[in-house]
Image (cartoon, grey):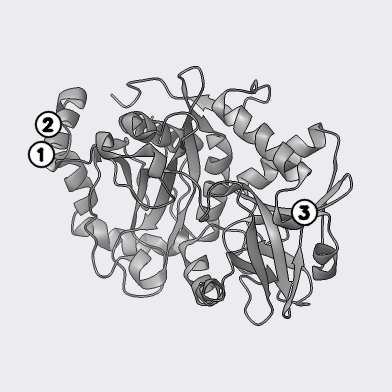
Amino acid sequence: MPAACVAPAAALGAAAASRRQGSPLRARAAAKQVPRAAGLKARAAAAAPASAADIDWDKLGFGLTETAFMVRVQCDVDGEWASSEVEPYGDLSLSPAAAVLNYGQGIFEGMKAFRTVDGEVVCFRPDQNAARFAEGAGRMSMPPVPSEIFVDAVKKCISANRDFIPPEGKGSLYLRPLLIGTGPILGLGPAPSYTFLVYCSPVAAYFKGGQLTPIDLVVEESYHRAAPGGTGSTKCIGNYSPVLKVQLAAKKEGYSDVIYLDAVNNKYIEEVSSCNFFVVNGDVIATPKLGGSILPGITRKSIIDLARAKGYTVEERDVSVDEVLAADECFCTGTAVVVVPVGSVTHRGEKTVFQEGGIGPVGQSLYDELTGLQSGKVEDKLGWLEKVPEGFHL
């Protein structure tokens, strides 16, 4: 039975008006119904999708490489989630009055699929992304995508774009699930209809210089990424553009990125623009606690579990700038960056270098453990890998 797309109460009036005019989303979805395998091949040929044969895997960076297919699921605010549709990767058609364009009603996720040493294709902890996605939808007054629909759509996207998954050791397939208010609305309120979409791109190292190249960070004291009671813990689309002003200025000065402080005391670190932060002193690893203004990263959670299993004491608490500057080593984590060492932190013009500008032993050990697990070199005893069979999308 299709999962219900539960309506926020405030949107029912707008949804009713949309139904009186007929649902263009349902009409377009019905028009796309074709036999699965034959239809996909015909539509792919007509759209002339990208070819993985053109990719030089040794020159892959972290940028958009268009793939062949994406997956789309539609839902009216008081209707049901439709079946996921695999379709050629391409542009979207939206009303100028779409809620996502006018009021920023949208969230996204970042996740990865890998080729393992034994030839399998796996996705890393999709259930955790599904849970965070559902929480984010609730914060943004959108109907949550049920976990089974989320994971199914992600696996179909991976399967349909299997040729675009880099060879083992050359990178990964980065997946970007989106939930956006596509229905038109003029007054402030939830959209009358929504689109859940998954697209992907093959990627390699996030920062210039390659994976495990130490990054140089600068502490930002004038601007803040998030505040208590805000949306810092939600991967909503409005959280990211505001950091560009500070990030671009920092990069002009030669830094890789920015460390943001808490908005109350302007003393405790929170996170870097797109990743979580860890501090190491001896056998103790500290990371800023989750309190509503920090994104609960899936890689962050995984590294905490792996570190504790290795015998490290991991503390989730306030971490001051002074503690960072006195650390043995620091590193950042995230889906895009994986585990990246911090070579230096500059605060008020004073530069502190860690591990002589290289990677520390703790960061290296945790990077090896995590990437070994994702590549199949380390046994997945925790059940974090979801296998994606060939042809799953058909």
Report x, y in % for residue 297.
63, 49
Residue contact between numbered discs 2 and 1, judged by CB atoms under 8 Å: yes
Report x, y in % for residue 366.
71, 38
Residue contact between numbered discs 1 and 3, judged by CB atoms under 8 Å: no
Q: Pointer 3: residues within 10 angstroms few (<14), some, or many (20+)?
A: some
* Circle 1: residue type: Ala
At x 72%, y 80%, the residue is: 349
Res. 83 image quadrant? top left
Q: Which residue is mark 3?
A: 355
Res. 40 image quadrant? top left
- What's the mark number on residue 42? 2
Q: Earlier in the sequence, mark 1 or mark 3?
A: 1
Q: Which residue is mark 1?
A: 46
Instruction: Check the image and report above or below for 198 versus 14.
Output: above
Structural distance between the alpha carbons of marks 3 and 2: 55 Å
Residue 177 or residue 213, whichever sits in front: 213
Structural distance between the alpha carbons of marks 2 and 1: 6 Å
Instruction: Check the image and report above or below for 382 versus 47.
Output: above
In this rendering, which labeled residue sits more in front, label 3 or label 2? 3
Structural distance between the alpha carbons of marks 1 and 3: 54 Å
Q: Residue furthest bottom?
A: 222
* Circle 3: residue type: Gln
Quarter of the figure with the C terminus: top left
Q: Look at the image and tell me whether residue 2 can be seen.
A: no
